[in-house]
Image: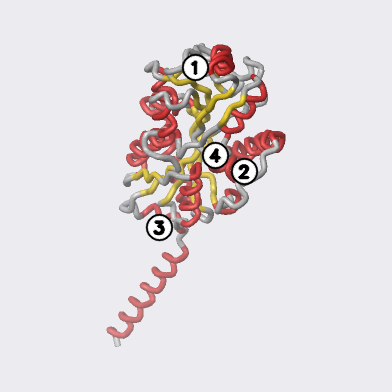
Amino acid sequence: MKTSVSLRRRTLALAAASALSALLPLGQAAHADTTKPIKLLVGFPPGGGSDAIARVLADKMKDALGQPVVVENKPGAGGQLAAQALKAAPADGTTLFLSHDHTVTILPLVTQNPGFNPATDFVPVAGFATFVNAFAVSGGTPAKNMADYVAWVKTAGQGKSAVGIPAPASTPEFVVKLMGQKFGLDLLAPPYRGSAPMMADMLGNQIAAGVASVPDFIENHKAGKVRIVAVLGGQRQATLPDVPTFAELGLGGLEDLPYYGLFAPAGTPKAALDRVADALAKAVAEPDVKKRLTDMGLTVEFATSAQLGEREKAYRTSWTKIIQTSGFKPL
């Protein structure tokens, strides 16, 4: 009789424990399992600005999270492949996407069927920086500034030249279009699969100029291998105090700053998102991380999930107007 009662009590206890476990938020379960690596997707090849930034953050975040953070490059279509991979990933906090404005904001505006909808397929985790795009010339050109470049194209190229861009239908492509209109040049914008191969062609003097983010150019600019001659944004950059903005050169409308942030699959538990956001906040607060990111041309500025969402919305609004004014039709 005692054995029967004892067995029934153990059975009831196990059932209660199972029921309690089922009621725990998924985020707590994710928090408990720190053995599974967190995958940090990057939509561009190794060697580019986004890849370098991801590796700096992954190295610090792993300490705060107490588990490995592995960078996985999925280059192609301006980050589109990585975004699609994020959409298909389990919403358990183990897959994140490090992205700037192009993939999350611009691609859905210029592509009819990108294979993902940021509003319904993604959730912002946190932002960590803003940056500016820049126009740079290769070392094979004699140009020291924008006026030199315009004069050189008109003389040596009879008004025609090519300006490389990291991805088709991207912010850099629209910058090239606006430059051509402003300075009376016939500029082609051949797209690359990321900034790294574009930079290789610039360093080899296979292409005279390019538009990409300051982090993509900064190291080679400092080394004197390329020359940044203009930046977007409303003010000059601390790392490039002698380089004028496009607005200073008479080309306005490009003052809104693009952003970098982390995104997760929609449906990821809030507890898991908060845990990652906290680790990111701690990482970018580290003096050595902040210095490294600043040296890459970023303005380090942590943003909560809500703040990143608002920043993306504002950026989308301004670029919707620019894209519509350009007459571009979604591909």
Q: Residue 29 carries which label?
A: 3
Q: Is residue 13 left or right of residue 324?
A: left
Residue that label 1 marks: 238
Asked if residue 65 is positioned above or below residue 209 in the image, the reply reads below
Which is in the foreground here, disc 4 or disc 2? 4
Badge 1: residue crowd in 10 Å (few <14, some 14–19, many ≥20): few
Looking at marks 1 and 2 on the same chain, the residue that comes earlier in the sequence is marked by 2
Of residues 134 and 39, the one nearer the viewer is: 134
Cα separation, mark 4 vs mark 1, equals 29 Å
Residue that label 4 marks: 168
Numbered marks: total: 4
Badge 2: residue crowd in 10 Å (few <14, some 14–19, many ≥20): some
* Label 3 with label 4: CB-CB less than 8 Å: no
Residue type indicated by callout 3: Ala
Residue type indicated by callout 4: Pro
* Label 4 with label 2: CB-CB less than 8 Å: no
Looking at marks 3 and 4 on the same chain, the residue that comes earlier in the sequence is marked by 3
Q: Is mark 3 on a helix, strand or loop?
A: helix
Dividing the picture into quadrants, the one containing residue 230 is: top right
Badge 4: residue crowd in 10 Å (few <14, some 14–19, many ≥20): many
Which is in the foreground here, disc 3 or disc 4? 4
Residue 59, given in percent of the width and then of the height, sits at 33, 37
Looking at marks 1 and 3 on the same chain, the residue that comes earlier in the sequence is marked by 3
Of residues 80 and 313, the one nearer the viewer is: 80
* Label 1 with label 3: CB-CB less than 8 Å: no
Residue that label 2 marks: 110
Looking at marks 3 and 2 on the same chain, the residue that comes earlier in the sequence is marked by 3
